[in-house]
Amino acid sequence: MLKKLLCVFLCAAILAGGVSLCAAGEDGALPFLVATDLHYKPKPQTAPVNFPGDKYYCADTSANLLSESYAVLREFLRQAAESDAGFVLMCGDLTHDGTLKQHTDFAGFLSDFERQTGKKVFVISGNHDFHSRISVEKFKEIYADFGYSEALVVDEATCSYTADLSDKYRLLALDSTSHGGGGDGFTEELLQWADRQAERAKQDGKTLIAIMHHNFLEHFPFQSKIMPLFIVRPELDLKTRFLDWGVQYVFTGHTHAHDITSYTDNAGRAVYDVMTTSLNAYPCAYRSAALTDGGLDIRTRRIDRVDAGDLPDGYTQELLCEMQTDFNQYALGCFRHAFESQKNAYIGEEALSRILVRFVGEKAGAFLDPFFRSFVQTLFLPIYEPDTPDGKCLAQMARDLGLTVPETEYGSVSDLAFYFVCVVFEGDEDVPYSDPQILLLMQCVYTSLYETMKDVNAQTREAILADLRANFSANALPFAVSAAGELALGAVRDDRLLETTLLLLSPLIESFSKDDGMPDNDAFLPAQSTDAAPATSAIRQLLTRVYQILQRYFSGLVRIMKKYPLFSGIVGAAKNRLKGM
């Protein structure tokens, strides 16, 4: 009788307290899966025809595999059921359009999964989940069984909550969306709510891990300028808040790329932004992870096949075979077509002009706009085969400038752009500077820049430089940027644009094509104290100060390189490299 009473009391305590504890493995590890940006839509009756006459006629122009999302979700849940993971974290964009039917269908799949496997699912919202304007309350109602009913605390104004994952770890699920727009929706009230949950976790002896939709650290240079809606506003300084909350691992999505980056403060405290690519777009990956006392072990898994029975009718036998044997290849083919259909929206003249304004401000942007547009128009000419009445192509222009252009499979700069987009999306970027794709891109940029600026008079150059100096300084960008602009424009006059282009673009291109040294796919992220570490603080502060000094005086170093022959050998070697000699 006593045992029965104890069992009843324990069950009541669990239900009342919202406790959801997942068992650790025999080695003490806590295994789980992370998936994001599933963009679920119900299975259509037939596959669409978006590219008539083409192999990937069914490719959706949004770059998401919408007609296949039902099959992708089913395959993921099958793999999750067979894994040793005790729970699954989903970081938003559960649905594509955010309709009530999409949400209820998706929640139904999760219910079946939990019932059949005994594994838990914890979700948080993404921007797409509110595209049809469902309310915060309705979202929490639909997904009550996937975090909210087990929650210790739920924020009334947002979809944020906390829930215990084990006797050691607690989940901090942060609703980073604005419930309608693409940008983040963090408010001071939500941050204060998180402050309180972090304090409670410390009192309870729990270690927090976090999930949210938006990134909070930059995963590539100038992400906050190029893609401001994909990253939390920098002025919120969320990285420092995570450190103060005792959070070391934050799982994010939204950008559809696979990357891990970190921030370490002067006290030696580290926090990781573990960004996972979309499950429902190339490369269709998710993460298998395990928390241990030593840190976080991460492995990348991909959707490599789907069941033909989960697909709509209308696919050719060739595509059905490809999806059942090499789904990633199919996803890549669809991704390429989506990129071609949408490239003007992302790397076209209008899109790049908007990015220019974000960097230099509206006044300077308006002044520079005609020159920049001319540069972009030239840059996107065919590389080898002219398709204009005047017979212009970049390779011929480059040869006229004395460059040896390598023969490649890339017919345009947009082809090169797609190559680098895939490199970034897949993670573990490792394209060396000697790669022929980088050489070709550099030659195309140089040729376009030369063609744009060769006829600009000295007075206009000086006006451009004045705007660059004033606006870059006002926008608090590094001093090196204004020096770079001055050097590039001055080089046209002094016939030094060739080596200047190489000098200025090399580090920028390599920052995209080469990773930061931290693995993105398979990695072990060591646990570190989130408390201040005075022993290392002084050293880190010194190194930070040295970096700031070097940054400030970079413009002076550039001017020295312009004036003195000491660097002529280095510049000459760079010039020969660009010429392909």
Image (cartoon, rainbow, N blue to C red):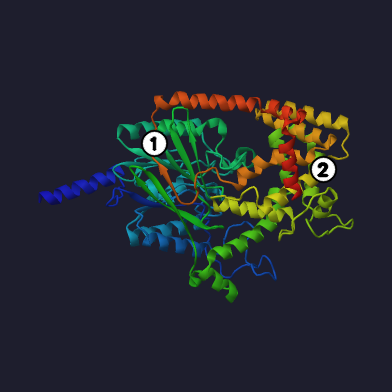
First along the sequence among labels 1 and 2: 2
Q: Quadrant of residue 312?
A: bottom right
Above or below residue 341? Residue 492 is: above
Give the x, y percent position of residue 337: 66, 61
Around disc 1, counting alpha carbons within 10 Å, would you say few (fewer than 14), some (14 to 19), or many (20 or more)? few
Instruction: Say whether residue 546 is left or right of residue 208.
Output: right
Q: Residue at x 63, y 44 (%)?
A: 510
Q: Which residue is mark 2?
A: 450
Around disc 2, counting alpha carbons within 10 Å, would you say few (fewer than 14), some (14 to 19), or many (20 or more)? many
Nearest the viewer among 36 and 560 is 560
Q: Residue at x 60, y 74 (%)?
A: 316
Secondary structure, mark 1, is loop
Secondary structure, mark 2, is helix
Q: Which residue is mark 1?
A: 528
- Identify residue type, mark 1: Gln
Residue that sits furthest to the bottom in the current view:
317
Q: Quadrant of residue 469?
A: top right
- Identify residue type, mark 2: Tyr
Q: Is residue 229 visible?
A: yes
Above or below residue 146? Residue 332 is: below
Question: Which label is found at residue 548?
Answer: none
Q: Is residue 315 visible?
A: no
